[in-house]
Image (tube, rainbow, N blue to C red):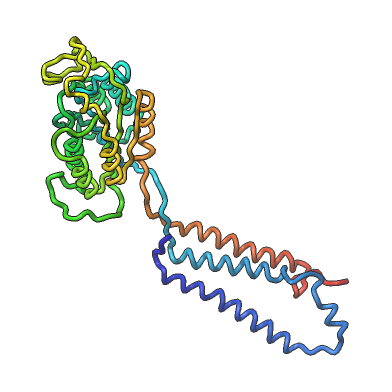
Amino acid sequence: MALGWPWALLAALAVPLLLTARWWLRRRRRTAVTVTSVALIRAALPGGSSWRRRLPVALFAAGLLALAGAAARPQATVTVPRNDTSILLAVDVSGSMCSTDVRPNRLSAAGDAARAFVEASDDGTRIGLVAFSGVAGVLVPPTVERQPLLEAIDGFRTARGTAIGQAILTSIDAIAEHNPDVAPSGVDLGPVSPGGDYQPDTIVVLTDGSNTTGVDPLTAARQAAARHLRVFTIGFGTTDPAPMVCTADQVGEDSFGGRDPAFGGFSGDLGFRRFLQLDERALTEVADTTGGKYFRAEDADRLADVLAGLPAEIGLHEEEVEISVWFVLAGTLLAFAGIFLALWWSRSGSPSGYPRRG
């Protein structure tokens, strides 16, 4: 917890000063009173313990301390929702997405999950779409319009290669187009400064393989971290070999070097299998470097759950919030409680705070 005006805590010195003054006045009264009868002293003594005299004073003093703390403007770090979130969804459309280990194939399952994610997102959240294989391109810049995103998802086409690092850099550039606080990927920002608040924009990378071309994913992740952009990564698919089957409208012109898995029954055995191996270590490092998280999704249901849960992860951030009002409330309640008890226990008019003896 931080303090906006720490010097205001000097007001708390009033509490020990008041307690000292109270003790001094009571001591002077005791020494100034002269009595000639022990019976009178016994009649004046309270009929109970001294805690009733001390509790109201303690409550009042605690209230004053809380009010002094409020004057110092205490601030707490809390997790709050953002209302300016932007999400760049980068989807792998490499040829391995034709694998049928996830029915009907990975590309169809990823498209269904992305479509459900877009439809369920808050209306005020901007979503952008990046597709990547050997190259990466922005299909839809960040927008609150849902229809262009859904149409782009329906138009996914496979191609050769997996450029995860380039997908991250392309997403950075797409964010920089609408967020002036984010520099494009080609700008050198110097050493990364740790800490600080994250940008409201976030990158989500969904892939089923490892980087095969272009910039290294960790190098791209460092650029994202330098811009305070989080990257969440999702590893999709199983480790079980399965036939590569895509429909005719899912296959790009250069997929599999001219082979059409929709008709050729391409199984991925011709030197292609190594590109089906998910590089979880690299995806985890990318997420950790940028402050994001890595998720594993082996089937369509798990992928849908991961995407559905992302808004809760992405839409929250830490913020310094002033909590003076709670100190004022506590101090007021304590002070009034002390005053109330003092008046209640002295309602009979006894100077000592207790009912007089009959």
Seen in the image, is 71 located left or right of residue 257? right
Residue 277 locus on image (x, y percent): 25, 29
Quadrant holding the N terminus? bottom left
- Write the residue at 46% across / 59% down: 324
Residue 167 locus on image (x, y percent): 19, 35
Residue 187 locus on image (x, y percent): 13, 48
- Write the residue at 38% across / 27% down: 302
Residue 308 quadrant: top left
Is residue 86 visible in this depiction of the protein?
A: no
Is residue 56 visible in this depiction of the protein?
A: yes
Vertical position of residue 350 compared to residue 131: above or below: below
Q: Nearer the viewer, residue 228 or 37?
A: 228
Residue 8 quadrant: bottom left
Residue 345 locus on image (x, y percent): 74, 66
Seen in the image, is 291 located left or right of residue 357? left
Seen in the image, is 213 located left or right of residue 349? left
Vertical position of residue 87 compared to residue 161: above or below: below
Q: Nearer the viewer, residue 86 or 135?
A: 135
- Write the residue at 30% across / 40% down: 284
Residue 169 quadrant: top left
